[in-house]
Image (cartoon, rainbow, N blue to C red):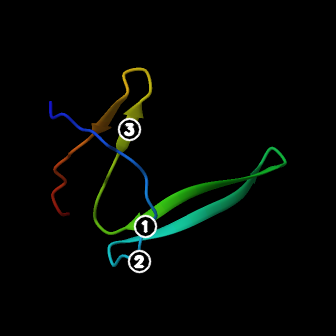
Amino acid sequence: MEDVKDVFISPLPDSPYVKPFRLNYTQNGKRKNWDLLEVHDSVAVVVFNITRRKVIFVKQFRPGQ
């Protein structure tokens, strides 16, 4: 496995590929929100394992329909 270092979050500049949104909703009488991205024809998952302090990337081949 590759040695991944210096991972951090930064603001997203204007991008033609992704559009950030915030979903606002009420659950059990409590206001909540969830940040999400609209992207085209892709799936991306990035998981940070807190116990092992590792970032996990998932790569999948998804043929067109």
Measure how far apart labels 3 and 1 are at the Cα level.
19 Å
Measure how far apart labels 2 and 3 are at the Cα level.
24 Å
* Residue bearing mark 3: 47
Look at the numbered discs 2 and 1 and tell me whether their residues touch, using CB distance below 8 Å: no
Picture residue at 35% right of the left edge, 44% below the top = 46
The amino acid type found where label 3 is placed reads: Val
> Badge 1 local density, few (<14 within 10 Å), some, or many (20+)?
few
The amino acid type found where label 2 is placed reads: Asp
In front: 11, or 32? 11
Disc with the residue nearer the chain's start (3 vs 1)? 1
Q: Position of residue 20 (x, y in %)?
A: 49, 68
In front: 2, or 65? 2
- In what quadrant of the picture does the C terminus appear? bottom left
* Outermost front residue: 6
> Badge 2 local density, few (<14 within 10 Å), some, or many (20+)?
few
- In the picture, residue 63 is in which quadrant? bottom left
**In the drawing, what numbered circle is on residue 14?**
2
In this picture, is 58 found above or below 26?
A: above
Picture residue at 60% right of the left edge, 54% below the top = 34
Measure how far apart labels 2 and 1 are at the Cα level.
7 Å
Q: Position of residue 4 (x, y in %)?
A: 23, 38
* Residue bearing mark 1: 12
| Badge 2 element | loop
The amino acid type found where label 1 is placed reads: Leu
Disc with the residue nearer the chain's start (2 vs 3)? 2
* Outermost right residue: 29
- In what quadrant of the picture does the N terminus appear? top left
In this picture, is 32 found above or below 18?
A: above
Q: Position of residue 40 (x, y in %)?
A: 32, 69
